[in-house]
Amino acid sequence: MAAVLKGDPVYIMGRTARESRRLTVQAHAYEPATRRILERAGIQPGMRVLDIGSGAGDVAMLAAGMVGPTGAVVGIDRNATILELARKRVTQAGLDNVEFFASDMRDLPPLGPFDAVIGRLTLMYVADPVEAVRALLHHLKPGGVVAFAEFNLVGDSFATWPSLPLWGRMWNIFKRLPEGTGIELAMGWKLRATLAAAGLTDVRLSLESPLMPASNGMPAFILAEVIRSVLPLVVRCGIATEDEVDIDTLEERLQAEAVPAGAIIKLPELVGAWARAV
Ligand SMILES: C[S@@+](CC[C@H](N)C(=O)[O-])C[C@H]1O[C@@H](n2cnc3c(N)ncnc32)[C@H](O)[C@@H]1O
């Protein structure tokens, strides 16, 4: 099985324990929005669901709760290491209707057919998302549910009130990552066209941004850890120097700026798109 198909960008985020923790904190922030997308898409008890790019397993576990004991979830990810964490978390949660396989989403073994194919924050990492969705549709029953959720990491998708200079500088660093570095920053905006080009009709859309006070600590942790993950690339591309970022004190400085200001943070927009296969 091909681990990485030709022309794929490199997965730029790191694969450290810290990043795994960032994924689970981030997943917590986006859990309500993701649940609403899956509900509106039609995920129901008894369904057999394929979750692509499962990472630490958060979406697979959410879906497992929704399909219940009469349903099942199969999660796949091309990173076998993070799946070990996902399996551990599933066991800790006492779920016995979820299993994970290491595989590329475009080259899956015959694990289906499935009632639904879902995925969050994963099409943004493949070179050709249309080709990926087309390949996934082969694993779906006729009339099956397709539901994806992806970030907008462009424009004012992320914001603070009041405006906070350090937070603004860090968001701008992320936004200036050049094309071709392994992440489609506008994947949320492109989701509808991607699903339509893969042959799906009547694609429904939603958009949500978690809004929270900086005082709960989650936004500063997420922003600092995202910057940490991409820092080597940021430095290589000449966007900022290590001294300018000072990564080991960044989370603390973000908090020191935001909390006394009573700031509210709007985390990046998550676009949901869903449809039924013909
Ligand atoms: C940002 S994480 C998202 C994890 C999870 N879906 C969530 O929302 O918490 C993206 C995941 O997609 C996986 N991924 C990227 N490209 C993939 C591919 N072509 N096939 C399978 N998994 C892939 C990465 O290994 C990573 O674990």
Image (cartoon, rainbow, N blue to C red):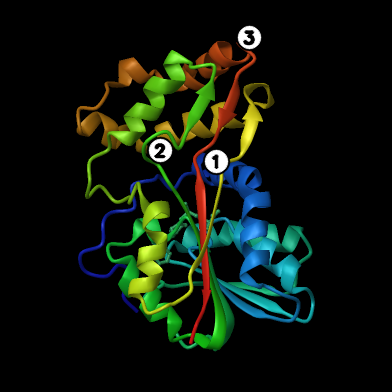
Residue bearing mark 3: 260
Q: Which residue is outermost to the front?
A: 202
Residue 113 in which image quadrant: bottom right
Q: Earlier in the sequence, mark 1 or mark 2?
A: 1
Residue 144 in which image quadrant: bottom right
> Quick one: 107 or 62, which is closer to the camera?
62
Residue 66 x, y percent position in the rendering: 74, 68
Q: Nearer the viewer, mark 2 or mark 3?
A: 3
* Vertical relation: 180 (above or below) 80: above
Q: Secondary structure at mark 3?
A: loop
Q: Nearer the viewer, mark 3 or mark 1?
A: 3
Q: Which disc number belongs to residue 92?
A: none
Distance CA(mark 3)–CA(mark 1): 24 Å
Query: At label 3, which amino acid type do we have?
Result: Pro
Residue 164 x, y percent position in the rendering: 48, 16
Q: Which disc number belongs to residue 22?
A: 1
Query: At label 1, which amino acid type do we have?
Result: Arg
Query: At label 2, which amino acid type do we have?
Result: Ser
Q: Secondary structure at mark 1?
A: helix
Q: Earlier in the sequence, mark 3 or mark 1?
A: 1
Q: Is residue 12 left or right of residue 7?
A: right
Residue bearing mark 2: 229
